[in-house]
Amino acid sequence: MACNPRPNNPFRWFDSSPEVIQMVAMLYVRFPLSLRNVEYLAFERGIDICHETVRLRVNWFGPMFASKIRSRRVQSMRQNTERR
């Protein structure tokens, strides 16, 4: 009996949607904001999240988002050098 492998989704263990996790992590990493400031900004957008949850999500998903951003930058730099 063959077992169907589950898709490798890093967000499957969390209650929040991937969009919310990405928004919160990117706000914290991209702008000079404190964890509580990110909590307040999310609350203004209708998302009730604790500052400690923000810290945990940034620690968990931050490296993944950073590697995606780096790979996009490298791809765009390579495309720009090929055009010259």
Image: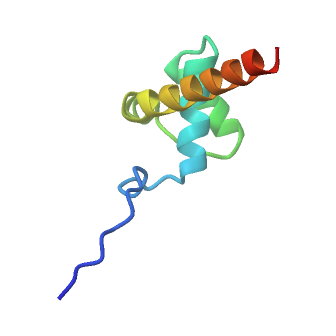
Report the residue at 46% width, 36% height from top. 50
Report the residue at 37% width, 32% height from top. 56
Find residue 7 and report its horizontal and vertical position in percent.
39, 63
Left or right of 32 on screen, residue 65: left
Report the residue at 43% width, 52% height from top. 11
- Whether residue 48 is visible: no
Left or right of 50 on screen, residue 24: right
Q: Is residue 65 above or below residue 2?
A: above
Q: Is residue 51 above or below residue 43?
A: above
Q: Is residue 81 above or below residue 67?
A: above
Q: Nearer the viewer, residue 12 or 79?
A: 79
Q: Quadrant of the N terminus?
A: bottom left
Tally the numbered discs: 0
Left or right of 79 on screen, residue 58: left
Residue at far bottom of view: 1
Q: Nearer the viewer, residue 77 or 14?
A: 77
The way the protein has been coloured in the rendering is rainbow
Residue at far left of view: 1
Q: Nearer the viewer, residue 61 or 20?
A: 61
Report the residue at 43% width, 35% height from top. 61
Q: Is residue 79 above or below residue 18?
A: above
Quadrant position of residue 59 = top left
Quadrant position of residue 5 = bottom left
Q: Nearer the viewer, residue 77 or 56?
A: 77
